[in-house]
Image (cartoon, grey):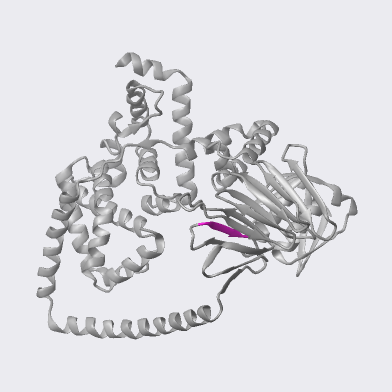
């Protein structure tokens, strides 16, 4: 769906077109589902929350204000709804704490595509290196390369500035390069 | 990380020629960035960061089966319709008056669209024109994309967007149509470019037309009747008035300027020539307070999203100070 036709669909949805709502649902459900799984690590919590989220979205469509980036808007509001839910259930005091202690945005070797000349072992090693990054670094990598959000959209979703997104990405890749260059990748091989 | 590195990272990430270097997809850009890197060894760290951010990490994406999505959707739709019947009557009234208002707005909108169409229909020529300092990104009906620099104009027949007349400066990414092998033409006052599917830059400022080819291959039919075949990485400059042709390979030594998606790329160009580009795109006049600065050479990328950014990039790379007084740019030694 291109940008302008998506805006038209959003407009129709706000006016109460159920068909437009269904189109939005179908184009974003899978992506939001995957994002939710990465945050919560639990598919039933993710699915329950997605249902409530879409019902809420429809019921409150007149009060959503101006939405510029539809994708980023859906990601950020679903992220908030899910974290609120998790907070309620597990009684976390704040999100930061949750992000630190939980296994958010863990990547598995199967999820990674490594250039053909590399073996399966290599993607295993890469997933381990990725999982050593901070939760924020992993989330920004996820949003950029898995969900295909632009830097501006990531800033909106993670509720940080554009510059912070760039810094986070730069730090993440500097770390990855450092790990690889300092030969730690060999150690990872040995550990497995 | 200091302030200047940070802005360099941002500049690199938003520069399409840098992206071409990362993807090894463009001979001119590769040459340009290789030499830039060897001249700026202190910027290596930032260049590598920008490169890794652009290359990124590839994921195997999971997509849920359609059946599952439809099941979840019907569950949601059920809750929505139950909610609707719960709502009290006054609310539906508010809603319907809202709908009426929207209908009125929509009707006016349609009227404008109809009038607009009438105008277009009455003349079969379509023109896109940019003002000073304005850049537009166009998608033509055949899928070709054109980035039009400031103070430039393209015209084509609405039934044939593959035959274009250009005044000013533009960058083309021509969509190839393998099934029909349909060609694409760009006509200027000096020559005609015949294209199949490719990327190239055309500049008709001054008394000549410059064509620089990035990808694919093109034929030029010059207004003096001769033809030229171009291969990627070549520059052809032809002037109808003086009947002079220049056909050269782009190298580190050659002086040329080109413009691509919001960035000027200058190689061995004097500040005087650089400022001519700025004058054309922004409708300003330049005055060299220090005449010796005219010959100051410039090599590098200059972003031109707006005049301010453009001028500050030029100031930095030439060690000058440019003061804007209304429509005039005064150039001093810094």
Tell me the residue at 45%/40% (across/down): A169
Tell me the residue at 61%/58% (across/down): B185
Q: Is residue B35 rendered magenta in the image?
A: no
Quarter of the view holding residue B193? bottom right
| Residue B113, position as x, y percentages in the image | 44, 79
| Residue A12, position as x, y percentages in the image | 29, 71
Farthest residue to the top: give it: A190
Q: For this rendering, which residue is in front, A172 or B184?
A: B184
| Residue B89 is at least partly visible in this image | yes
Q: For this rendering, which residue is in front, A84 or B219?
A: B219
| Residue A91, position as x, y percentages in the image | 18, 46
Q: Is residue B146 rendered magenta in the image?
A: yes
Tell me the residue at 53%/57% (across/down): B145
Q: Quadrant of the N terminus of chain A?
A: bottom left
Q: Total number of numbered labels?
A: 0
Q: Quadrant of the C terminus of chain A?
A: top left
Q: Is residue B105 above or below residue A165?
A: below
Q: Which stretch appears magenta? A: B144-148
Q: Is residue B204 left or right of residue B55?
A: right
């Amino acid at each position: 769906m291109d940008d302008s036709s998506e805006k038209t669909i959003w407009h129709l949805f706000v006016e109460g077109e159920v068909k437009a709502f269904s189109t939005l649902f179908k184009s974003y459900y899978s992506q939001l589902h995957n994002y939710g799984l990465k945050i919560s690590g639990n598919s039933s919590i993710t699915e329950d929350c997605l249902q409530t989220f879409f019902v809420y979205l429809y019921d409150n469509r007149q009060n959503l204000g101006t939405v510029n980036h539809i994708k980023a808007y859906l990601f950020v509001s679903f992220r908030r709804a899910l974290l609120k839910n998790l907070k309620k259930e597990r009684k976390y005091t704040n999100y930061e704490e949750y992000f630190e202690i939980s296994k958010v945005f863990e990547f598995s070797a199967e999820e990674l595509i490594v250039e053909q000349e590399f073996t399966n072992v290599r993607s295993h090693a890469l997933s381990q290196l990725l999982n050593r990054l901070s939760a924020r670094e992993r989330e920004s990598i996820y949003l950029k390369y898995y969900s295909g959000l632009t830097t501006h959209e990531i800033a909106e979703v993670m509720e940080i500035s554009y510059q912070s997104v760039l810094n986070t990405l730069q730090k993440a890749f500097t770390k990855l390069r450092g790990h690889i260059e300092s030969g730690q990748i060999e150690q990872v091989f040995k550990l497995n | 990380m200091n302030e200047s590195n940070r802005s360099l990272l941002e500049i690199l990430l938003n520069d399409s020629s840098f992206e071409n270097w990362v993807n090894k997809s463009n001979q001119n850009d590769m040459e340009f960035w290789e030499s830039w890197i060897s001249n700026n060894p202190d910027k290596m760290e930032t260049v590598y960061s920008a490169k890794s951010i652009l290359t990124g990490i590839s994921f195997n994406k999971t997509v849920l089966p359609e059946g599952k999505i439809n099941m979840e959707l019907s569950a949601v739709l059920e809750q929505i319709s139950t909610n609707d019947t719960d709502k009290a009557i006054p609310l539906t009234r508010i809603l319907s008056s809202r709908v009426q208002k929207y209908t009125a707005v929509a009707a006016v909108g349609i009227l404008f669209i109809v009038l607009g169409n009438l105008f277009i229909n009455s003349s079969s020529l379509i023109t896109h024109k940019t003002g000073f300092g304005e850049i537009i990104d166009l998608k033509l009906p055949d899928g070709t994309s054109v980035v039009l620099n400031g103070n430039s104009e393209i015209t084509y027949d609405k039934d044939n967007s593959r035959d274009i007349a250009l005044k000013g400066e533009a960058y083309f990414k021509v969509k190839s149509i393998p099934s029909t092998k349909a060609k694409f033409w760009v006509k200027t006052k000096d020559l005609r470019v015949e294209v199949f599917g490719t990327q190239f830059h055309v500049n008709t400022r001054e008394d000549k037309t410059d064509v620089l080819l990035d990808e694919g291959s093109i034929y030029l039919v010059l207004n003096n009747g001769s033809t030229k075949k171009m291969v990627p990485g070549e520059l052809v400059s032809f002037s109808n008035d003086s009947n002079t042709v220049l056909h050269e390979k782009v190298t580190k030594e050659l002086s040329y300027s080109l413009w691509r998606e919001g960035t000027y790329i200058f190689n061995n160009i004097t500040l005087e020539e650089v400022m001519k580009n700025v004058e054309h795109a922004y409708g300003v006049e330049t005055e060299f307070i220090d005449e010796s600065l005219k010959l100051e050479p410039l090599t590098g990328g200059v972003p031109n999203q707006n005049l301010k950014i453009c001028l500050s990039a030029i100031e930095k790379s030439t060690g000058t100070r440019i003061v804007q007084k209304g429509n005039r740019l005064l150039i001093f030694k810094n």
